[in-house]
Image: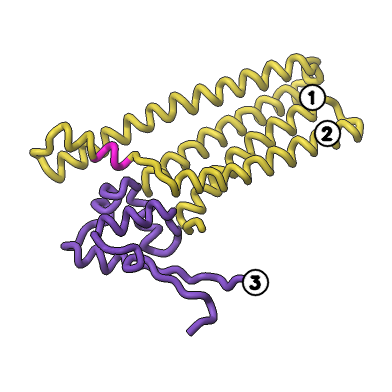
Chain colours: A purple, B yellow
Amino acid sequence: MAKKLNITNNIRTLRFFANEMTQQELAEKVGASRQTIVAVEAGKYFPSLELAFRIALAFGVKIQEVFDCEAEGDK
Amino acid sequence: MSYQEKRTFFSIVTGILILVAYITYVVQKYQAGNLLAEDVKFWAGVILVFIGIGIAVNIVGQIVFHVLLAIQIAIKKKIENNDASDQAIEKSINHEMITDEMDDLIELKAMRLGFVISGIGFVTGLFMLVFDYSVVMMLHVVFIAFSLGSVCEGFLQLYYYRKGVQ
């Protein structure tokens, strides 16, 4: 059976380095609601591939720099 | 409370109001010992009227809710920045009321619960017919199950907005 993936993100850090971009600003840039950005940042919602790419594009980085994952039990 | 939560909360309130109004009406009819109480045609008409009322209340309510919310956002924006242009206010209203993929996912997941509850109600209604209850009782059960399903759907949506959805 496939191991469960533990997906994490660096959105908070990236927002900080993007001149303290607010969640609302990021939401407007990617065409999502602030509620969705809040949920993604808190790991309560895993975005679609499209939204994930949009978030990465909003920060001008590669998607791997925004999202990371490891299989549970690794490490 | 976000726009999505407020909207869902409003749907729950209207759903509960319709459900309570219907149950109250049914109980009153039965308590009055009205001969119409076992008339299938009469109750089918009543249910159709309640469905119509439910749709109308929901549509009018949503319009009023969105107008009030837009006013609230506009006032908030004006207080924050007195020089804010109409375009800027309109933009912030549009951004506040945006629905996206997470809303769609939550709606779909919650709708599943609504269908399950409605389905259980329908099957219960069929069992009631098998066990010699009247068709009218079946209609009540089915209508209440559908309304309850809709209300539970709203509560599940609120839960997902708070706890997140995977």
Q: Amino acid at mark 3?
A: Met
Kindly report the distance in space between the C-alpha atoms of the residues bearing marks 1 and 3: 51 Å
Q: Nearer the viewer, residue B151 or B92?
A: B92
Q: Amino acid at mark 2?
A: Leu
Pinpoint the chain carrying mark 2.
B
| Residue at x 83% of width, y 34% of height | B126
User: In the image, B127: left or right of B2?
Assistant: right
Residue that numbered label 2 is attached to:
B126
- The quarter in which the N terminus of chain A is drawn is bottom right
* Residue B34 seen in this snapshot: no
Residue that numbered label 3 is attached to:
A1
Judged by depth in the image, the label closer to the viewer, 2 or 1, is 2
Rendered position, B135 above or below B39: below
Q: Nearer the viewer, residue A1 or B52?
A: A1
Work out which residue is located at the far left of the displayed protein and give it.
B83
Kindly report the distance in space between the C-alpha atoms of the residues bearing marks 2 and 1: 12 Å
Per the picture, the main secondary structure of the magenta-coloured stretch is helix
Q: Position of residue B57 (x, y in %)?
A: 49, 25
Q: Position of residue A4 (x, y in %)?
A: 56, 71
Q: Quadrant of residue A3?
A: bottom right
Q: Position of residue B120 (x, y in %)?
A: 74, 41
Pinpoint the chain carrying mark 3.
A
Magenta region: which residues?
B92-96
Judged by depth in the image, the label closer to the viewer, 2 or 3, is 3
Residue that numbered label 1 is attached to:
B136
Secondary structure beneath disc 1?
helix
